[in-house]
């Protein structure tokens, strides 16, 4: 078993993040009674260079240690793996599982203002565009099926794929989006259990589709990357005395 805590150093450690780390740590400690190889991994997801600060990274490490939540592996810094993320994304493009999109945020908003659409409308999906500066790489969501999984907290959850937008994998500067980096790293690091807050529940459907696409693209080239999906558990969010989600603007949320 391997569980991971993967905070972003865009602020001091949030009490909700600490609670998530605690659940991961406790789950691994229980597993260690039966499995000497059980691992609690710490991965710092520091790809947002505009918002990251070194003192916040150190604050996360110090807070976890003061709480007694020692990790077995890491910290691994996601920013050291950007080339890996990019390589996987371009492989998906080569296998026609992703496409280049020229639409700006303003283009999408202008088209949506004339319709009832919300989000990206798949405008470039079938245009077969070659890469140009300013383009983003989008995942081609399979539209004719349903994605479902068993959540260890919530039971069976599912979504119609047609309700998911073709989400961005690489920004126009070729840096990875959260869903891509998160999926590739969990796959490469043999993570077996993803325990996190319920705000990531919607992202999990994207991650499952992306995981399956990555596995299929590697199988097509004869490489071995057919790793099983991890088990997912989405924890209820912490709330304040008014039962509102904790807000950095309103509540004291830093550990």
Image (cartoon, helix red, strand yellow):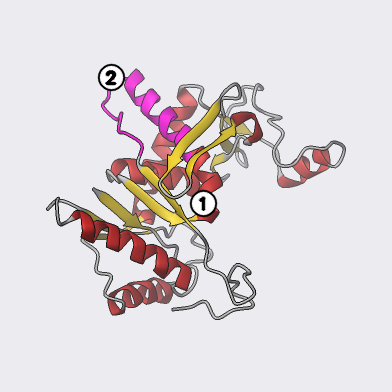
Quarter of the image with the C terminus in it: bottom left
Between 105 and 246, the one nearer to me in the picture? 246
Between 173 and 10, the one nearer to me in the picture? 10
Q: Which residue is mark 1?
A: 200
Task: Decide: is 31 above or below 211.
Answer: below
Tell me, yes or no, if residue 223 can be seen here: yes
- Magenta segment: 207-229
Task: Decide: is 63 above or below 176.
Answer: below
Task: Decide: is 40 above or below 9.
Answer: above
Instruction: Answer with left or right where residue 31 lies relative to residue 238.
Output: left
Q: Position of residue 222 (x, y in %)?
A: 28, 19
Instruction: Label 2: state its secondary structure.
Output: loop
Q: Main secondary structure of the magenta part?
A: helix
Dot 2 or dot 1: first in sequence order is: 1
Instruction: Label 1: state its secondary structure.
Output: helix
Tell me, yes or no, if residue 175 can be seen here: no
Q: Which residue is mark 2?
A: 222
């Amino acid at each position: 078993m391997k569980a991971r805590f993967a905070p972003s150093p865009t602020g001091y450690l949030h009490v909700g993040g600490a609670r998530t780390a605690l659940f991961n740590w406790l789950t691994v400690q229980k597993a260690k009674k039966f499995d000497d190889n059980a691992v609690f991994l710490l991965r710092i997801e520091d790809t947002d260079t505009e918002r990251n600060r070194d003192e916040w990274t150190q604050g996360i490490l110090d807070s976890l240690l003061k709480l007694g939540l020692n990790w077995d592996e890491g910290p691994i810094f996601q920013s050291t793996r950007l080339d890996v993320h990019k390589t996987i994304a371009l492989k998906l493009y080569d296998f026609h599982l992703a496409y280049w999109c020229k639409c700006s945020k303003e283009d999408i908003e202008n088209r949506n203002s004339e319709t009832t659409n919300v989000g990206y409308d798949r405008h470039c999906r079938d245009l077969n565009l070659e890469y140009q500066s300013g383009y983003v790489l989008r995942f081609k969501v399979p539209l004719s099926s349903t994605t479902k999984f068993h959540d260890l907290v919530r039971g069976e959850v599912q979504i119609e794929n047609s309700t998911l937008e073709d989400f961005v994998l690489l920004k126009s500067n070729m840096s990875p989006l959260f869903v891509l980096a998160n999926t590739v790293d969990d796959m490469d690091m043999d993570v077996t259990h993803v325990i996190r807050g319920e705000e990531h529940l919607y992202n999990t459907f994207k991650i499952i589709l992306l995981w399956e696409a990555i596995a299929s693209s590697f199988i097509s080239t004869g490489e071995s990357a057919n790793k099983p999906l991890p088990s997912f558990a989405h924890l209820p969010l912490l709330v304040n005395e008014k039962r509102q989600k904790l807000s950095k603007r309103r509540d004291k949320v830093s550990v």
